[in-house]
Image: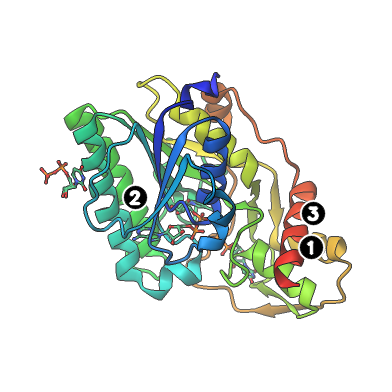
Amino acid sequence: MPLDQYRNSRILVTGGAGFVGSHLCERLLTEGAEVISVDNYYTGTRRNIASLLNNPLFEAIRHDVTFPLYLEVDAIFNLACPASPIHYQRDPVQTTKTSVHGAINMLGLAKRLKIRIFQASTSEVYGDPVVHPQKEDYWGNVNPIGIRSCYDEGKRCAETLFFDYWRQHGLPIKVGRIFNTYGPRMQPNDGRVVSSFIVQALKGDPITIFGDGGQTRSFCYVDDLVEAITRLMLTPDECTGPINLGNSSEFTILELAEKVIKFTNSASKLIFEPLPLDDPRQRQPDLEKAKAVLDWQPKVPLDDGLKETIKYFKRVLD
Ligand code: NAD
Ligand code: UDP
Ligand code: UDP
């Protein structure tokens, strides 16, 4: 798939100062695009994009996507939204507003400009899945009134809006359902499992296993995800998604903890804490559609990705 189509185009990345967004901005600049990051720095930081600020093709705007935004761009990647449970549960009303009002504003912008728009959706639309692995035609098992609902239902409503703008206004949309992704530039304190375990192991603190650690997740390294997202945007208009993006290698949380301890040479002990409410028992993407449509598959095994991420956190914590 020729990514040189990005050359000389102006791309808006909302959530551009976040973990995934900053890697995406960097990648688009490498492909020769002009990139505008829009972020309110709620969970992202200017440090994530500091190395890009001297690039004349990069621009960073402080803005909250729940308010209208008027810019002239050629495509939009809509990533703005807190993603870790402790961050999205801190101000749940704002989380729903960001997903829903943010989607409406970015779709309005895309509609005015008649341009493509990508939505960073999530495996959380499947909730605590009773179908395993999850295929895109599974409608999910989501609690509409629980503590995760602001995020899960917000993202589901955003998908509804994307498909209604597509049906009603003929807007070219790209909906990617992202499964657990990790890598450098995750926030050390965001409570997500990979960042938490690495920080705990490096500090010699106890590793906090929620529940019995038998629940599973499938972890994707950020470079693999960014490759998939950049390809998805360039697919023909009929490729709307939703399309699963992630890595299908599934691990228990206990296995993850053991790997982190081994790769950090840590003396940390495991401690067991209560499982948060509505915590999904298992999660694994079916990637057949992504492989066929994007001619892509994740390349980075968990061991290699963890080692890279550990290097990053060693630098951050020093
Ligand atoms: P992140 O929290 O690092 O990044 C989100 C960014 O959005 C931050 O920079 C934050 O400041 C910004 N933001 C939040 N609310 C905003 C608002 N109202 N206006 C403007 N900016 C706002 O999280 P991430 O892991 O990089 O996730 C990026 C996107 O991918 C999110 O939409 C998330 O839901 C989605 N996603 C991520 C994962 C994952 O495992 N990382 C999995 C599924 C979906
Ligand atoms: N919008 C925006 N930038 C634009 C165009 C629209 O932020 O360039 C916002 C606008 O504030 C509106 C939302 O997008 O609330 C949805 O726009 P749309 O045209 O779909 O709806 P309408 O304006 O008719 O309500
Ligand atoms: N988890 C854990 N200890 C932690 C943080 C998370 O055992 O310190 C577990 C959590 O209960 C969940 C899994 O790890 O089962 C993934 O959690 P994360 O918050 O990273 O992502 P999500 O639940 O949204 O997939």
Query: Residue drawn 24% across and 41% down?
Result: 109
Query: Residue drawn 78% across and 72% down?
Result: 201
Q: Is residue 135 visible?
A: no
Label 3 CA crowd tier, 10 Å (few <14, some 14–19, many 20+): some
**Element carrying mark 1:** helix
Q: Amino acid at mark 2?
A: Arg
Label 2 CA crowd tier, 10 Å (few <14, some 14–19, many 20+): many
**Element carrying mark 2:** helix
Residue 45 appears left or right of 318:
left
Choose mark 2 or mark 3, whichever is in front: 3
Q: Ligand 1: does it lie within 8 Å of the C-beta at label 2? A: no
Query: Residue drawn 34% across and 57% down?
Result: 153
What distance separates the C-alpha of mark 2 from that of mark 1?
A: 33 Å
Asked if marks 2 and 3 touch (Cβ < 8 Å), the reply is no
Q: Give percent across and percent down for residue 304.
A: 79, 47
Residue placed under numbered mark 3 in the picture: 307
Q: Give percent across and percent down for residue 118.
A: 39, 38
Residue placed under numbered mark 1 in the picture: 260
Q: Nearer the viewer, residue 57 or 165?
A: 57
Q: Amino acid at mark 1?
A: Val
Q: Nearer the viewer, residue 44 or 282?
A: 44
What distance separates the C-alpha of mark 3 from that of mark 1?
A: 9 Å
Q: Nearer the viewer, residue 219 or 80?
A: 80
Q: As displayed, is residue 288 above or below residue 156?
A: above
Residue 134 appears left or right of 173:
right
Going from N to C along the chain, the mark reached first, 2 or 1, is: 2
